[in-house]
Amino acid sequence: MEKSEWTQSMRVRTAVVMTLAGILPIIICHIIVFTSSGQTLDDLFHWIPLYIPLLIVLLLIYWWLADFILRPVTQLLSATTKLMTMDIRQRLEVGAHEPIETRELRKSFNKLLNNLEESLNIQCQFVADASHELRTPLTSIQGYTKLLLRRGSNIDANLLGEALQTISDESGRLIRLVSDLLQLARADAGQAIISQLEVVDLRDVLMSVEDTVMVIAPEQIEVKFIVPQTSMYVNADADRLKQVFLNLTNNAIKATQAGGKVTVTLRATSGQAIIRVIDTGIGIAPADQQRIFDRFYRVERSRTRSRLYGGGTGLGLAIALTIIKAHGGTIELESELNKGSTFTVKLPITDAPGKAQVAGHGAPPSPGSGSPSSTGNHPTIS
Ligand code: ADP
């Protein structure tokens, strides 16, 4: 239905309802007066022709009044219709003299548009960052492949080794990046990032992390896992939890210089399992701490990409946060530059071992979820 037809039909219905509401009490009063004064219904029927002009007059008055009453709604309708074809950055103008209902409706619309614009900006930024991250290793692979093709069999053995190593490293990086992106994209699409929740002993998870980490940790760094003697159970997807603690411990090792220490501890307080990954490494500046869980955020961009800390995708902590939230837990960071960092993960403890429910509540937060940003300066539509 066209907008003008819609407003006309609304006006007609309002005018008819108001006319009926106006004429009915008159007819009822008429009937009461007639019956109480002893007159017959036939006498009443003689009056019927007089109702017709009254009906027409009332209809005309209410037709005019309906336009007056519905004007804010029709204005709102035309403003929102304009929005459909316009820029998402535009906002509805909120008039000071407008009735409160439509004013509130306009404000709600503007809030909705703020949220939409914010999500769109986050998505655009994400696509731009992802493209940039994908392009870097691809450029490197392409460069070395072209070099190998150009030189053919005349290539020096060292250069050949270097080229193949780089191609292998960069394709490994691409695979990591694509699988991280896939994991986040699935989570954004509302698919549970965790699959099967079962009662898991956190000590087993941390011991398995320890086994992996000990193989890759440099000898010059002391890596210690301190876990209690008794089991500590949580409802969890063990593989995803292992992924989180591996990421935190790997980050800690990469951030720690020779002679430094990385300690992973597990303890329980008031129904919560507390896992701490503590390092004596380079630390994280307060400004970076705010953004460390953002997608693609890497501190080394601003602190000159260190040899110690290169090659990451910048997605590890974003994924870790999504996984821990899906488990009903939290991650906190305390850090001091040049002194070290502590990542604290808290997870709700469960009592008895036994199968728990399949994860359905694993829907992760959307990128940049949280309170909507302020309106900012937007062009308005009245
Ligand atoms: P990446 O895959 O690049 O490691 P993460 O999301 O895991 O991505 O980490 C984001 C950034 O946070 C890292 O690039 C690093 O600069 C910084 N970071 C993470 N953990 C630590 C830590 N323990 N000490 C210092 N910096 C850290």
Image (cartoon, rainbow, N blue to C red):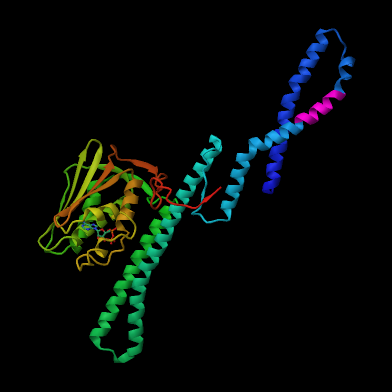
| Tally of numbered discs | 0
Name the residue at 34% across, 72% down: 137
The picture places residue 188, in percent across and down from the top left corner, at 42, 53
Pick the front one: 184 or 293: 293
Of all residues shown, which one is farthest toward the left? 259
The picture places residue 40, in percent across and down from the top left corner, at 88, 12
Name the residue at 33% across, 40% down: 354
The picture places residue 72, in percent across and down from the top left corner, at 60, 40
Q: Is residue 287 left or right of residue 228?
A: right
Q: Is residue 74 left or right of residue 286?
A: right
Extent of the magenta region: 49-58
Q: Can residue 223 be seen in this view?
A: no
Pick the front one: 267 or 54: 54
Ligand 1 resides in the quarter of the picture at bottom left
Name the residue at 42% across, 45% down: 360
Q: Is residue 57 above or below residue 192?
A: above
Name the residue at 29% across, 92% down: 154
The picture places residue 266, in percent across and down from the top left corner, at 19, 46
Majority secondary structure of magenta residues: helix
Q: Quadrant of residue 41?
A: top right
Magenta run includes residue 366: no
Of all residues shown, which one is farthest toward the bottom? 154
Q: In which quarter of the image is residue 168?
A: bottom left
Q: In this view, does 12 lie above or below 25?
A: below
